[in-house]
Structure formats: C-alpha cells, structure tokens
Amino acid sequence: MLLPEIQTPAIVVDLDRMDANIRRAAEYTRQHGLALRPHVKTHKSPRVARLQMAAGAVGLTCATPREAEVMQDVADDLLVAYPPVDPGRAMRVASLTAPRVTVALDSAEAIARMGEAARAAGRVVGVYIEMDLGMHRVGVTGADAAVALGRVAADTPSLEFSGLAFYPGHVRQAVPEQDAALREISDALGAAIDAFERAGLKPPVVSGGSTPTLWRSHEIAGVTEIRPGTSVYNDRTTAAVGACAWEDCALTVLATVVSTAVPGQAVIDAGTKSLGREPIRGAAGEGFGALLDRSEVTVRTMSEEHGILDLSRSDWRPRVGDRVRVVPNHVCIVVHLFDEVIGMREGVQVERWPVAARGR
Amino acid sequence: MLLPEIQTPAIVVDLDRMDANIRRAAEYTRQHGLALRPHVKTHKSPRVARLQMAAGAVGLTCATPREAEVMQDVADDLLVAYPPVDPGRAMRVASLTAPRVTVALDSAEAIARMGEAARAAGRVVGVYIEMDLGMHRVGVTGADAAVALGRVAADTPSLEFSGLAFYPGHVRQAVPEQDAALREISDALGAAIDAFERAGLKPPVVSGGSTPTLWRSHEIAGVTEIRPGTSVYNDRTTAAVGACAWEDCALTVLATVVSTAVPGQAVIDAGTKSLGREPIRGAAGEGFGALLDRSEVTVRTMSEEHGILDLSRSDWRPRVGDRVRVVPNHVCIVVHLFDEVIGMREGVQVERWPVAARGR
C-alpha cells in the first residue's frame, strides 16, 4: 500500500530510520561500556522492543504496569521507573513473571508498599533509589536521605538494593550548551555514590540518561546504565536541541489537507487528538510539528481534529486532498494517541503493528 | 468499589452530575425551540449517547468515521461535522447504515469526493455547507461562495442540500463578554440565510452552537440546531468562562500522590498522557487542571506520567498514597486518552463503560 492510500490520520514509521536509530544507540553504549535499557514509553510496542533487545539492550524500562505486563514477553529484565504507590499498581508490578524486576522509588511509603506487595507475591523485587539531581520532579534530595532509603530497601527481605537512578530531564538546552548542567549532575552523583559506598551500600547500577543528553552520557562520571526513550523514533524537539539530525526522525503523522477555504492557510486532519499540544523545549521553534519534507511549514494552531498549517514561510500552496507528513514535537505523546503503527520502507507500507502497551 | 480502591490514573464520572447536565441542555433547547444534536467527540461512548437521545436529542454529531460507525447503533440520524476528504474516509461515511447521514463540507473537492462515495454506495447523503463566521478554521467565507457550493451539492444526485453549519469556537471569552461576538455572528448568519433564500435554496437546518455559547444559542437569529459536546461532562475551562458551575463538572481524573520527595510540591500519577496539555482559554487560569475539592490546588507542570501540584495557595500537604480528583482543563482530550470510564454515584463505583468510539 502506498502512502496516498492509507487512511488518515495515521502514524507511519520509516523502518530504515528506526533501525539506524536503534543501532546508533547500541553502538554508542557498547563503545562507552554503558548498559542500555531503552524506555518503552516512546513506542509501547513489542515489535520495536524486540529489535532493541536484539541490538544489545540489557533489559527494558517501563513507566506503567501495562507496559511491564506487555514487555515481559520480550525481556527477562524489567525496570519500572515509576513508584507503584497505589496497592493495585504495586501488586501488578509484584505479579510480573519476568525473572528480574526492579523499581525506582523515592519514599519510605513507596518502599513499604512495594515490599509488602513483593512479599505477598512471594518474590524479590530490586530497588533503585531515585535521586533528584536537578529536575525537581521526583527523587530524594541529598545523599544522606538517599542512603537512608537505600538502607530501608536493603533491610526489607522481599526487596533488594539494586542501585541509584536519576533522570536528567531538566537538561533541555541544546546539546552545545549542556556542559554546566552535566558538570553539576556529575558532581552531585559522585558525592552520592561516595556516600553509598561509605555506608557499605555500593550501588551495583547507576542508571541515568535521557534522549537530549544521550550522546554525552559517558561524560557523567559513575553512570553505568542509560534509559533513552525518544531516540528510537526521534522528533522535532530532539532535532531542535541537536541530539539527532532531521533525517533521523523516523515517525511522522500522515495527514490529509481537508480545507483551504480560509485564505492563507490549510487545514489538515491531525489536531490535538493526533499530535498532542507539546511545545518545543530547550530550543527555538514555534508550532506543534513541522512537515517532514518542508520543515518551514509548521502546525500553527490546532483543534481536536484540525491542524492549521502556517504557510507564511513557504511558497507551497496545498490543495484539498494533498497528503503531508508531520514530524511531531514530542513523539511519545503521539504514539499514546494511536492504536496502530504503519511501518514503511521507501514509501511503501510493509507492515502494521499494534501499540500493544497503550492503555492502563 | 470505593474510590480509594480504584487503580489510578482513571477517569471517573459522577453520574448524577452527568444526568443533570444532559437534562439541562435538553430543557434549554426545548424551551427555545432548538433541535439538539450533541457532539459525541466529548464522550465517545454509546452509554452516554443513549441518555442524550432519550432526553430528546434529534440525532448525534460525530467528527470521525469511527465515531459515526459506533454511534449508528444509538441514533438513526448522524451528522459528520468534518470533511471526509480522503477516499477511505468518504467511503466509510457513505457506507454507514444509519438511515440519515449528513456531512458538513466547505469545498467543491470535498463535495465531489463525498458525492462520488455516496453514488458508489448507492445512497443519498445530506450536505450542510460549512461557513466561517469568525473562527477562521474551516468554512466558506462569504454568502456568495457558500450559495455556490450549496448549488453544487443540490445538483449532485447522490447528495442533498440540507442546510448551513458554522461553529462559534472563536467565542471563547467569558459569557458576560460574548455580546459583540454573538451580534457579529447573527449579522453574518442573517445575510447568509437571506442569500440562500434568494437563490431558491432555503436552508432546512441552520446548525451552530458550542459549549461556551450554549445557553445563548437562542440569541443567534436563524439558528435551528445546536451541537454542544463538552457540556455533557463540563470542565475547568467551561466553569472558568461561566458556562457551567464548578459543581457541574462531572468528569475527573482520579490520581494518586506518588512522591512528595521534592520539598514544596506533590507529584501525582496523572501527567500529559492522562490530562493532555490544554491551557484554559477565554478566562484567567493557570495550570492544566485543578482539584475538585480544592480548586486552589492546580497541576502546575507535567511530564508524561507525572503531574506536579502547585500547593502555594493551599495549606494542604498531601502524603504519598493520598487520592485526588482533578478537573481537567479540556475534558474531550482527556476522554480520548483513556479506554474506559468509571461511573460512580455518591463516591461508589456503580458501573464501567468503554470509550468505544476512541481510535480511528
């Protein structure tokens, strides 16, 4: 099936680009002696996770119980990088059949709940202590508090202290300007690792890494594992901050021009319910996505099912029925909005796969 | 099941409030002699659509082919208020088994495609000519161009000229300040209706109406039908602009506090993948949602699965494991992010229903 025949809106993945993105991350981590544990939140698809494992990933990172339940068919070693606080969620994590399950936690309450669920399920769950190294979202502040929590985990029979985790998601500036932020993380992380070692809790794993900082992960002293998500597909933000080339963007939203009735604009059938409403962060860039083949044309405003193209920087004047491919600002949000992905090579659909780990 | 036992994040509908919202819209339209054709994009649920029909709706409004395919089990009279431009989409609309199907169109291309699909399916499809009365999204500009399109539809054997449609979605200001905008719409609409009548194409239906302007629809001269969506559940924006009371908000996102590790804030397990990233428009209001029981506490920032509560205007200090109910800024986006709705009365879950018309 050719692109003009696919019903829109749809998400389309260029498989050659995706393959290259997976290979590139695997080669980088191999070269620097880092373990690669890709975050599946971006693709939510066993089809893609299998390729990541085959390329050399040590395991997978998940955010939701649903992601972990689906991904245990693909990998024996799962990290749930999210505190499973409510009892139902903790029990679902403890009930995973994967041989190795680790969770990242940042409170005594969460450790107690996870420990109780693991005990009830008759298994041992690993614990990373989540530290806040500048993002100010979750994570323990300061090495002493982190060591104290690590001790609680180590002393809980159904849990195992497995290491430290942090997420440098606040390092959003473009790649060349990241130096100071990465130095701060390195310093704080070094102090934390020292404190854990002094307490007799040498962390077996130090897990960090985001897509914007992906290619500089080896500069953060102490990191042994990284968890990039977005890099499998990449998106407009990743390209804008310089962590990928525009030609590395593998996923686009295929859309049809449905109206040119209002002069000076064109309306496509991809709005907030297909593209999300994510701004570009960490670099300049207006709008909610840009056309793959005409990146000067952006999605200026949206309604739920309408995207209005900004044609002011382009001579191109589309007609009703024309097809466009939009590179979204934030691909993880877009995948969550669709049930199915179309895989293509050289402009031809070669497969479809479900976004199997969508939902709750 | 009580709220504390429901796994989060989840969307929960207060059925008493929803019932009252449905009744209120039906009573208003009855009182003013308007036909009510609720837009199902908000709930995407036959469960809810049946109540709307039972309350007196003349039919339903849909945006996507999927919505129409699911809703034809509920109503015999469907409006697809979206140009089905790509051939697959036009064929799906033409293939609906509902006895009466109407589409809103704004271009000769879309009329030609819909006419061809209806001819191939061996049926007659009604056409509303969509006019732009100030929103500048879709719709023909000016009465002459609209009449010309109406003529094309009337002259196409597989189509029927069924009326005019417009969407006053640009009238976002708070209810008391809407006067000038509504007068402008009234004037433009009056001129258009006159032009159609002079051309011998008296519009059988004049279809308008949004939730922010819902209770003033009767002030727009010429309107015979309205298509409110959001009003079935309402949301923080609807309350902020004064088109509903806070106590009319029927849908909330139930979430659990998962981290209080970073001082001065609390993190809930509802982020962009549960709440969307919709701003309040048309009225003041920060953040992406507010707590039902403490509306001074808002969701300040989000990641995909994290929402950070702004506690700066509250003395309340939640603990890990506490439950909250978030009234989202834009409920239509939130429903699209979930597969299932929990219906409750007086704090107890009494049913669950699928968001059956989600997806494509």
Image: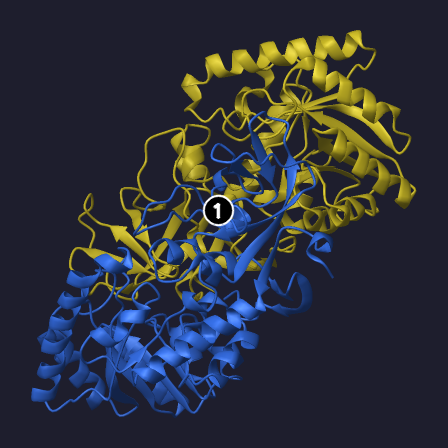
Chain colours: A yellow, B blue
Disc tally is 1
**Is residue B32 shown above or below A151?**
below
Chain bearing tag 1 is: B
Label 1 secondary element:
loop
- Is residue A191 in view? yes
Question: In which quadrant will I find the C terminus of chain A?
Answer: bottom right
Q: Position of residue B43 (x, y in %)?
A: 50, 68
Which residue is disc 1 drawn over? B295
- Crowding at mark 1 (Cα within 10 Å: few <14, some 14-19, many 20+): some
- Is residue B134 in view? no
Name the residue nearer the viewer: B255 or A55: B255
Q: Position of residue A66 (x, y in %)?
A: 69, 51
Q: Amino acid at mark 1?
A: Ser
**Is residue B282 shown above or below A182?**
below
Name the residue nearer the viewer: B306 or B243: B243
Q: Position of residue A22 (x, y in %)?
A: 59, 37
Q: Position of residue A267 (x, y in %)?
A: 28, 59
**Is residue A62 shown above or below A183?**
below
Left or right: A164 as drawn, with respect to B161? right
**Is residue A294 shown above or below A353?**
above
Q: Quadrant of residue B219?
A: bottom left
